[in-house]
Amino acid sequence: MRALLSRRELLRWLGAGAALLGLEARDVMAAAGGDAAKAAGAGAAGPGAVAARVVADPRDLPPPIRRDAPLAHEFVLEAREVTAEIEPGAAYDYMTFNGRVPGPLLRVREGDTVTLTLRNSIHSRTWHSIDLHAVYGPGGAADVLQVLPGQARSVRFKTVYPGAFIYHCAVPGEMDVHMARGMFGMIVVEPAGGLPPVDREFYLGQHETYTRQLPGTPGPREFDAERLLREQATYVVFNGAFNALTAARFGAMQARVGETVRVFMVNGGPNLLSSLHPIGNVWSRVWFMGAFATPSMRFLQSVPVPPGNAIVAEMELPVPQTIKIVDHAMTRALSKGAVAELVVSGRENPALFAARP
């Protein structure tokens, strides 16, 4: 198995200490009236600390942007290594942004200016970084944002093009390991004209991970580098854990008949393509690959979301039911944890659907 941080790499980055040391990371804030994303999450955890959960609340995302002029934002993300249950009774060592999987959704507008600071917890065992696919810059800013434990670095960039994009850890030689442990999130750059109004929005992050133990096996989970190299995932999950967003785990998402919901979904990979499907419904409007600059597509059943990519998709909800959002590579949904539930409550609509004897 590869070391988290080789001696040669550590010495090389310590040699660049003048550029890394002494930077005071600022609190998350935005210019007055801005649309800054919340940097919510568990507190920094020490080695061996067990977090209550890493599962991000799918409702925890900033509101739609309703303004005509660009703004300046300041965001702070912290790299945190925590231990939490990937399924009941099965502890797993995660790498996260702000203690959650996926990391916070950052929401800005085309033409905005962003100052982003990455802090690396003093308790981390290795370096971390951020590559943002919404950035024109070296390594998507990752060449600058390589941060040792206890340190912080910042960049400033302008959001030139609209879309929904992944950000993820991008340390040399270990990028796939860090992403498989949970280090990814989404930055949404809304077009200048904004997005159509909807009743509710949800934020999902799919990724796979690789452990020596299979789902359902008692005891803790150990990361398996050989499975990673063979791309033989043991878990494929939404928001960090096995069947996390279901009534049986941390709770299903909720909506009402007659509403329209929008789902922001980012595929952290590191390797597997998702086939995103809502059982009992279709995606009524889809911005394929999160591309707001191109026309949306209508009424798609299963939508491919490659690793390192994102999608923005909407559903209309005409009948009450529990919609299961799954990766339609069905073994992942049935056996590896790729299921999220949306409970739609309200009156029956027999003109549209009625059960018959």
Image (tube, helix red, strand yellow):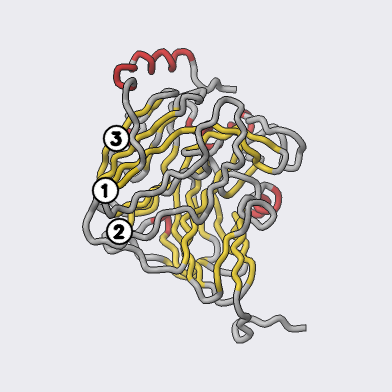
| Towards the viewer: 37 or 231 | 37
- The answer to whether 175 is drawn above or below residue 55 in the figure is above
Q: From the viewer's perspective, is the residue at label 2 or at label 3 nearer?
A: 3
Could you say whether the residue bearing mark 1 is in a helix, strand or loop? Answer: loop
Kind of residue sitting beneath label 2: Pro
Residue name at image x 75 percent, y 42 percent: 216
Q: Quadrant of the C terminus?
A: bottom right
Left or right: 128, with 70 as reference point: right
Q: CA distance from mark 2 to mark 3?
A: 22 Å
Mark 3 surroundings within 10 Å by alpha-carbon count, few (fewer than 14), some (14 through 19), many (20 or more):
some
Disc sitting over residue 31 in the figure: 1
Kind of residue sitting beneath label 1: Ala
Q: Which residue is situated farthest in the left direction here?
A: 69
Could you say whether the residue bearing mark 2 is in a helix, strand or loop? Answer: loop
Is residue 342 in view?
Answer: yes
Left or right: 32, with 195 as reference point: left
Q: Which residue is mark 3?
A: 155
Q: CA distance from mark 3 to mark 1?
A: 17 Å
Disc sitting over residue 271 in the figure: none
Q: Which residue is mark 2?
A: 191
- The answer to whether 256 is drawn above or below residue 163 in the figure is below
- Where is residue 193? Give x, y as percent: 28, 64
| Towards the viewer: 247 or 261 | 247
Residue name at image x 47 percent, y 65 percent: 200
Q: From the viewer's perspective, is the residue at label 2 or at label 1 nearer?
A: 1
- Where is residue 313? Give x, y as percent: 46, 62
Mark before the other along the chain sequence, 2 or 1:
1
